[in-house]
Amino acid sequence: MDIKQIVLPEEIDTDELLYYRKDEELVEAAKDGSLVFHKGGAADFNTFMNSFSIGKWRKYTKLETIQLSLKLQGSFTVYLKHHVLNHGQVKTKILDEKTILSPEAKSFTFDFGEGKDQGIYSFSLKSNSHGSKLWEGKYFEDVRVPENMNINIAVDICTFKREEYVERNMKVLKRQILENPQSPLYRHLYVLISDNAKTLEPEKVIGDSPYIRINPNRNVGGVGGFTRGIIEAMKMQSSHDISHVLLMDDDAVIEPHSLEVNYVFLSLIKEKYKNYVMAGSIMRLDEPNVQYELGARWNRGNIRAQRHFLNMRNLHCILENEEENEPAEYTGWWYTCYPLSALDKNNLPLPLFIHRDDVEYGLRVGNGHFIFMNGLCIWHEAFENKMQGSLEYYDIRNLAIVNAIHHPDYGPKEFKKIFTRWVINNIVRYRYNYVEMNFRAVKDFCKGMDWFIKQEAEPLHKEISSMNYKTQKKEEFIGYKGIKESDYDWKMLTDPKQFAAVGKLRKYFQILTLNGYLLPARKDKVLVMPPYNNMYKMYRASEVIYTDANGNSIHTRRSVKRMISCFIGLFKMLRYIDKHYDQAKETYVKRYTELTSMSFWRKYLEL
């Protein structure tokens, strides 16, 4: 049974070092898809995409041993390796070494021997002659057949006016899987697209594929689109044997082989793990080798991304990813594969519109039972590269709702701490409109479940969005008070040096002066900064232009009057929380299930 293909970076433009490490001068990628070696050239496949997570496969599936098949031409010495972390140190053992010779392209089989219960397998090649080639390869098990024959995955995508991204991803999936009989996922993958804007053109997205469906959907946010996909997958459960629904962002860059490995893994999974959730890591699109997150801890609202900012070119980081020391509490809906057997028509997501919907559902359905594996991933724009905007409302409101449901002991005192810190962070960054959204979020949460049930999501979102700053293109600011094109250099803006901590004495002085609020502003100082900036760099600045990676900008000005108004509002809101929080919390604890049933969602989505 074929378990996992050796993948070369031809479908998506990511990072070669995630696939193999090679001698730069002695190994090169050819146009025919092969790797060509000069004599003495070597390549190592102990990488994020092409190593084999033997420990995970042995733990969660029926797989026992693994072999390697390589289609080679010329002369090579092939090394089979096993890698583990031992007390934080990488330990590598060569399991076997063989030399092959073939003037023609020919497949050779290599055996890793008795299966290991930890770490990863990999292989490396060293060429003994000029012009030797690696054509393809795969990991396989010689006598294995699928244990679970009825694995069929429905990819659930929610989109809103993202035609370009959806069309791109469908082209990739059609070419690699849906219209490719050689793919193990051929005829086992369906794509359900919830079109919240009702703007997708079927001929551009679907073509003549019977495996892609577009469902025009009422715009009640991302959670509305994803829940529509879950409902459609449940409807197909009997007619198409759908066993899993995989929630995936519309603008994610996908490696189709991740889906194939996911499928094979599920076809071999042990009975006791059948209700576990498989999830992928999110990789940074601007730095494709950097892993942003591999699951996360909700931590009562103080979110902690796991395996955050790991460099996946690094073997130590790859092995660190294999560790399961602390279970994730939830996974993001950029790549989360739920077994339908673990879902229930009366246990659907909560209609939070956007943000924290995946947190709440992960806490409720996942129960800490998540499986991650190197190579299961998508690439996505880093979140700190984006403006918060209306999320300043949803992040506060939904944080309170999630904690009310899953942490009933979470009280007003704890909520006030995180709320105060959030508001002050916005005040010192001159983002007074964001503060108003934060206040509105608290007031709406404290209205309780009766309000939440009755509120109309789309009009509310428009109202919240109207409180946001007007976004302008960077060109509108070039020349303003001396701002130059170079001030928008994204690498410079996000250089770690820009976020370096200031000295202790200066930090304390800036805190005592409210980061310069109590001193005269420097009228000539206009800063261009990324959305998540170092607030100490803003000391006494009169104006700040916030920009994202695409040059979309908002303009904020320091205002002592608005600062004072925000602090007065903060003190009022803290008293408001003391008065109303507990009563509102109880309504969510007792009644949230009114919003998670199939009957509610069918009415809510107007199905």
Image (cartoon, helix red, strand yellow):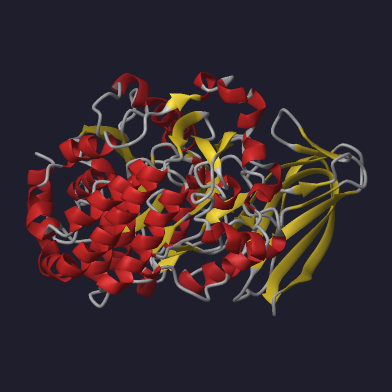
Give the camera-side residue of 51 and 224: 224
Give the camera-side residue of 145 and 122: 122
Q: Position of residue 415 (x, y in %)?
A: 30, 67
Q: Position of residue 436 (x, y in %)?
A: 29, 46
Residue 150 visible (yes or no): no
Identify the residue shown where x is 9% and y is 39%: 606
Q: Position of residue 563 (x, y in %)?
A: 38, 48
Q: How many numbered markers are drawn?
A: 0
Left or right position of 189 against 239: right
Snapshot quadrant of residue 112: bottom right
Residue 282 visible (yes or no): yes
Left or right position of 100 against 571: right
Give the camera-side residue of 226 and 464: 464
Q: Farthest residue in the bottom direction? A: 87
Q: Position of residue 26 (x, y in %)?
A: 88, 41
Where does the C terminus fall, quadrant-wise?
Answer: top left
Vertical position of residue 142 compared to residue 255: above or below: below
Identify the residue shown where x is 51% and y is 53%: 376
Give the camera-side residue of 417 and 337: 417
Identify the residue shown where x is 7% and y is 45%: 603
Left or right position of 521 against 395: right
Vertical position of residue 57 compared to residue 236: above or below: below
